[in-house]
Image (tube, rainbow, N blue to C red):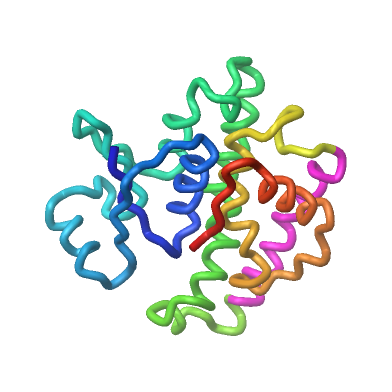
Amino acid sequence: MILYSMPSSGNSYKVRLLLALLGRAVPCIDIEYGTEPLAQAKAEGRLPFGKAPVLVLEDGTALAESNAILCYLGEGSLFMPQDTVARAQILSWMFWEQNQHEGVIAVRAALRCYPHRSHEATPARMDELLERGHALMAIMEARLGAHDWLVGDTVSLADICLFAYTHSAGDRGGFDMARFPAINEWLARIQALNGFEALS
């Protein structure tokens, strides 16, 4: 397998993190914004939706979208149980991450960190994203205040998926993480997992 990965992206990072936790070494092709490898990957049709991550399987099949890749890699592991209700609950968090969380938490970080997007960072937009992001993380805080993990009694794909952008929400996104002690404890639990790999 080969992973086309954007080093600074949380969506790419969640795939690299799961691979590390599974102990699977997969060659990575870094395709950061504005680089020749990204342009080449697009020109060669390597990115079905025009973006990373993309996992190319042994037979040449290209899997796009981070959470779809997580589901593929997590199948048969402790990160994706066989119980149908638990699986549905995991998918609920993963759908919520892409539909709600990522579009606020990751976007605010991108507006602060990527020069080519800085023109979008108007005070009104940043204030709106800050308020919405705190409200979204309050949903996670409510769950994690009573449970160690987002689903069930052990780590799952839901946790890996939401860790990616949540762990950098303070430093990169400017969110007030002191409001969320249960989230901070959950982040520490994930960072203590065997095989954990930090965002490079």
| Horizontal relation, residue 86 to residue 139: left or right | left
Task: Tell me: residue 189, above or below residue 113.
Answer: above
Of residues 135 and 195, the one drawn nearer to the viewer in this rendering: 195
Where does the image place residue 199, in percent across and percent down from the top left? 52, 59
Task: Tell me: residue 166, above or below residue 46.
Answer: below
Q: Main secondary structure of the magenta part?
A: helix
Count of numbered badges drawn on the protein:
0
Residue drawn at the location 42% of the way across and 82% of the way down: 115
Indicate the quadrant where residue 82 lies.
top right
Report the residue that reaches farthest toward the left. Answer: 44
Residue drawn at the location 71% of the way across and 38% of the way down: 150
Q: Which residues are magenta?
A: 126-146
Where does the image place residue 8, in percent across and percent down from the top left? 45, 64
Residue drawn at the location 57% of the way across and 53% of the way down: 164
| Horizontal relation, residue 47 to residue 144: left or right | left
Residue 155 among magenta residues = no
| Horizontal relation, residue 44 to residue 105: left or right | left
Report the residue that reaches farthest toward the top. Answer: 83
Indicate the quadrant where residue 29 lies.
bottom left
Where does the image place residue 102, in percent across and percent down from the top left? 55, 55
Residue drawn at the location 46% of the way across and 40% of the way down: 19
| Horizontal relation, residue 197 to residue 118: left or right | right
Task: Tell me: residue 181, above or below residue 26.
Answer: below
> In the rendered image, which quarter contains the N terminus?
top left
Where does the image place residue 98, in percent across and percent down from the top left? 52, 48
Residue 133 among magenta residues = yes
